Image (cartoon, grey):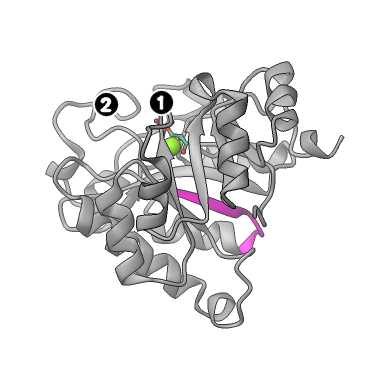
Amino acid sequence: MWRYPKVLAHRGGGTLAPENTFAGLRRGMRAGFRAIEYDVMLARDGVPIVMHDPWLGRTVAGSGKICDYDALELAGMDAGAWFGRAYEGEPVPLFVEFAQYCKVHGVWMNIEIKPVPGHDTETGATVARMAAALFAEELAAGQLERAPLLSSFSQAALEAAREAAPRLPRACLMDALPPDWERRAGAVDAVAVHVNHRHLAPGQAAEIKAAGFGLFCYTVNDPGRARELLGWGVDAFCTDRIDLIGAEFAEA
Ligand code: G3P
Ligand code: MG
């Protein structure tokens, strides 16, 4: 069962603002979104930051690995200039501040745990522990629809997240659905399966739903395709094109 919003702004504001930044989040909110997906990894000091790539060079100028820097060093770097002059000086967000901002503003979160290679367990456990602390009251009250959904391509990260915060829901992220998808989802008590819509067939969608899992697709940028996926029983999806696919798209 999917108890969450149906359309999420990917990486905060899709491709309309620098990804995984406060500016992106605010852009998504201005477009009416109150649900987002974003990526989290650990800096060298073990502090989680909001970031997609495990290396510098694309969204943050420089070279080398993200995990060669402490979180506060990264927070002082520019994650907006690559996107345009108007975003110069936009910092790399600390996860705790980003998540708090979302909570305060009523923005529901699908937090993608994106470990830098070799740090799966530590990343899964840290992100889950911090997210569970932020939503301790909601989790204690059983208000699971308000708590974030943790997802990851890393099975080890999801296992660690379950150990650290068993009550915080998890989802298995997969590109093409592997033959053992149900075993993998079951192994971490996942509530949902998140897949790349490009590889999903309608029969697989039906199979996932029949097995009782929520079904989420990334990253759907064409309104016609979004409509087709919803017709297959897909519960929700994220989009980069928040200008073409609005937050209420699935309700129409
Ligand atoms: O969580 C869905 C999607 O974001 C997964 O791929 O590379 O965009 O983080 P990626
Ligand atoms: Mg992601």
Q: Residues within 10 Å of mark 2 (few under 14, many from 20)?
A: some
Q: Which image quadrant shows ligand 1?
A: top left
Which residue appears at 67% of the width and 57% of the height?
3
Name the residue nearer the viewer: 85 or 17.
17
Name the side, left or right, on which 2 lies relative to 42. right
* Residue under label 2: 61
Q: Is mark 2 within 8 Å of ligand 1?
A: no
Dot 1, crowdedness within 10 Å: few (<14), some or many (≥20)?
Answer: some
Mark seen at residue 81: 1
The amino acid marked with disc number 1 is: Ala
Residue lying at 75% horizontally and 25% vertically, measured from the top left: 227
Residue 104 screen position, x and y as percent = 61, 64
- Quadrant of the snapshot with the C terminus: top right
What's the magenta region?
A: 104-111
- Confirm or reject: label 1 Cβ below 8 Å from ligand 1: no
Single out the residue that lies furthest toward the right: 252
Front residue (pair 202, 219): 202
Q: Quadrant of the N terminus?
A: bottom right
Confirm or deny contact between disc 1 and disc 2 (CB under 8 A): yes
The local secondary structure at tag 1 comes to loop
**Residues at marks 1 and 2, CA–CA distance in whole angstroms:** 9 Å
Where does the image place residue 162, in percent across and percent down from the top left?
35, 65
Q: Classify residue 240 as left or right of residue 188.
A: right
Taking the spot 33% from the left edge, 50% from the top edge, the residue there is 49
Q: Is residue 235 in sight in this rendering?
A: yes
Three-letter residue code for mark 2? Ala
